[in-house]
Amino acid sequence: MASSLRILFSFVVALFVTSAFAQLDQQTYDEMAYLAKHASAAYKEDCRSPVGTTKLAQYENGAKGYIAVDQQRKWIIVAFRGTNGAQDLITDLDNALVPYTVQGSKGCQGCKVHSGFQKAWAKNVNAVISDLKIVKKEYPEHRIMITGHSLGGGLSALCGITIAQEFGIGKVTAYGFAAPRVGDKNFAAHQEAAFPGKTFHRVTSMDDGVPQDLKVSEGYYHGGTEYWIQKEPNPSINDIKVCNGSEDPTCNAKAAANVRIPMGINQAHFTYFVQMGSSTQC
Ligand SMILES: *[C@@H]1O[C@H](CO)[C@@H](O)[C@H](O)[C@H]1NC(C)=O
């Protein structure tokens, strides 16, 4: 009797623990750690072989970044650059919520998105999609993986939806680091539909202020499942919390609640596994 009670008790404890703290799995951790390096490498236009892969295309107008092929993992990587220079700053500051019209918006009734991000994507959406079609034809079995840091993390959501609609819902995976909010609540639901089953990983770190800069009270809403890193650099699997959906009040939102720096750009914004944009990441 005593021993079966004990078993029951440990079972109840185990249930409680697993529901309170969802564990990060090893594969997600590995993908996240590796793509953080690409999010960093996207800052370097002169990097021909980002993190040992082969760069196939680069964009310097509109949504900036690259397409690379990783033959070892069998991945096609689309990495978007964060803010780097005056044109990107103008993009960031153009933060009114406007009707969502760029390719990928079909089926999103009354949705609104960040004006500057949408303008940036509208400039080269045709070029990126047509290049990706050529690459995908060459490597039909490769997975498409999308990443980016900061502005690049925001673009991962907006551009990622277009790419997912074009290449197959559920077949594209995204890891967006340190992203600000990109659109309204309807847009967040549209993002969820384009990335079903938690395939959009919205990674935040400690008290990074950028993910909280554009506010829910201003009409913005995050999409993607939040993964909150609690130690930098080089976090272990146990330093990362799988949060409850996209707007968990106990993760980065709580840690960054009192950040009062312009655009939220504090120290925590620059380190996600590695230093973002550092010359060692290429
Ligand atoms: C997760 O968030 C939803 C709201 O989005 C809430 O209803 C639910 O209670 C939360 N679950 C936990 C375990 O906090």
Image (tube, rainbow, N blue to C red):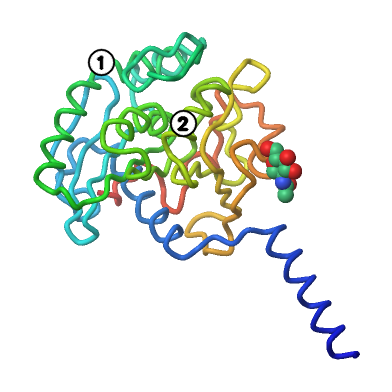
Dot 2 beta carbon under 8 Å from ligand 1: no
Residue at the image position 56 percent from the left and 35 percent from the top: 266
In the rendered structure, the answer to whether residue 136 lies left or right of residue 156 reads left
Is the Cβ of the residue at disc 1 closer than 8 Å to that at disc 2? no
Give the number of callouts.
2
Q: Amino acid at mark 1?
A: Lys
Q: Position of residue 150 (x, y in %)?
A: 44, 33
Looking at the rendered structure, the secondary structure element under dot 2 is helix
Marks 1 and 2, how far apart at CA: 21 Å
Q: Residue 238 versus residue 219: which sits nearer the camera?
A: 219
Q: Regarding ligand 1, which quadrant of the image does it lie in?
A: top right
Q: Dot 2: within a 10 Å radius of its alpha carbon, few (fewer than 14), some, or many (20 or more) residues? A: many
Q: Quadrant of the N terminus?
A: bottom right
Q: Residue 123 versus residue 191: which sits nearer the camera?
A: 191
Q: Is residue 118 visible?
A: yes
User: Residue 123: which disc?
Assistant: 1
Residue at the image position 51 percent from the left and 11 percent from the top: 110
Q: Residue 198 versus residue 262: which sits nearer the camera?
A: 198
Dot in front, 1 or 2: 2
Q: Quadrant of residue 255?
A: top right
Q: Position of residue 3 (x, y in %)?
A: 85, 90
User: Residue 191: which disc?
Assistant: 2
Residue at the image position 16 percent from the left and 48 percent from the top: 140
Sequence order check, earlier mark of 1 and 2: 1
Q: Is residue 249 visible?
A: no
Q: Position of residue 45 (x, y in %)?
A: 21, 35
- Can you name the residue that lies furthest to the right here? 2
Q: Amino acid at mark 2?
A: Gln
Looking at the rendered structure, the secondary structure element under dot 1 is helix
User: Residue 212: which disc?
Assistant: none
Q: Residue 142 versus residue 266: which sits nearer the camera?
A: 142
